Amino acid sequence: MNTGRTHGTEKPAVFFGELEGTVVKKFVFIVGLFMLGGCTVGYKMPDPPPAPVQRPTPAPRALTISDSVQLCQEIQTATDITIGCEFKYIDGAPAMFLLFPDYTTVLNSWKILTEGIAAPFCIAANSANGPAQLVLAVSNTKMARVYFCEENFWTEWVNYGDTKGSRDTRY
């Protein structure tokens, strides 16, 4: 019978505390392994939501210079809007003047005018391999800036003074 004492070269008896520590360590290791295995195998991340379908931005309509002149005349003769439009040739190059009563009107209508008139006008001029200008003028501040279609460049705002002969009387 083993009393827990050592006699000579005998190995010491295993006490319950030593046995308990080994069993507990193995138990903790197995439980931990089981939990890790369960987490990686049993849990699946939800699929990400599908990416929103982005509709391509439609390209501006392809116009000719004469189409642009006609649109400009329609804007100029419209009585329900305060924006004016004049079309001239400066040194043989087409120039479209968009005339606004104030800067708020510029901000409120610029996107529509850019997509519907200005961009198609510049595309038509560039397709014809010729220079063209778009002039943005604000009546109440007498400020204007010029966009050179061929160079894709805006000038800084400049004062254009009082040119009553070329302004629309609607504003």
Image (tube, rainbow, N blue to C red):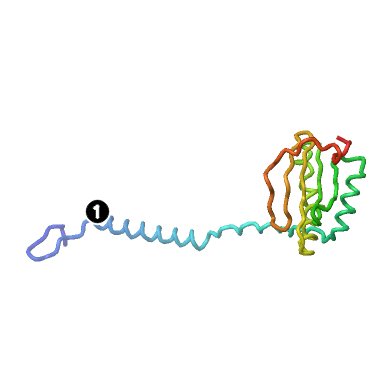
Pointer 1 residue: 17
Along the line of sight, the residue nearer the viewer: 108 or 74: 74
Image height of 102 relative to 37, above or below: above
The secondary element bearing badge 1 is classed as helix
Point out residue 112 in the picture as x, y percentages from the top left corner: 80, 48
Residue 156 percent coordinates (x, y): 67, 44
Where's residue 14, x and y in %?
A: 20, 59
Q: Quadrant of residue 164?
A: top right
Q: Nearer the viewer, residue 5 or 63?
A: 63
Does 30 sit above or below residue 72?
below
Q: Tell me, yes or no, if residue 116 can be seen here.
A: no
The image shows residue 82 at horizontal and vertical percentages of: 86, 39
Q: Quadrant of the N terminus?
A: bottom left
Q: How many marks?
A: 1
Quadrant including the C terminus: top right
In this view, the residue in front, 47 or 28, is 47
What residue lies at 79% left-to-right and 54% top-to-bottom? 91
The answer to whether residue 9 is visible is yes
Q: Residues within 10 Å of mark 1 (few under 14, many from 20)?
A: few
Q: Check disc 1 and give the amino acid type.
A: Gly
Residue visible at 7% across and 64% down in the picture: 8
Furthest-left residue in this view: 8
Task: Using residue 171 as the reference point, say whether residue 103 is left or right of it.
Answer: left
Q: For residue 47, which quarter of the picture?
A: bottom right
Name the residue at 80% across, 52% down: 90
As drawn, which residue projects farthest toward the bottom? 9
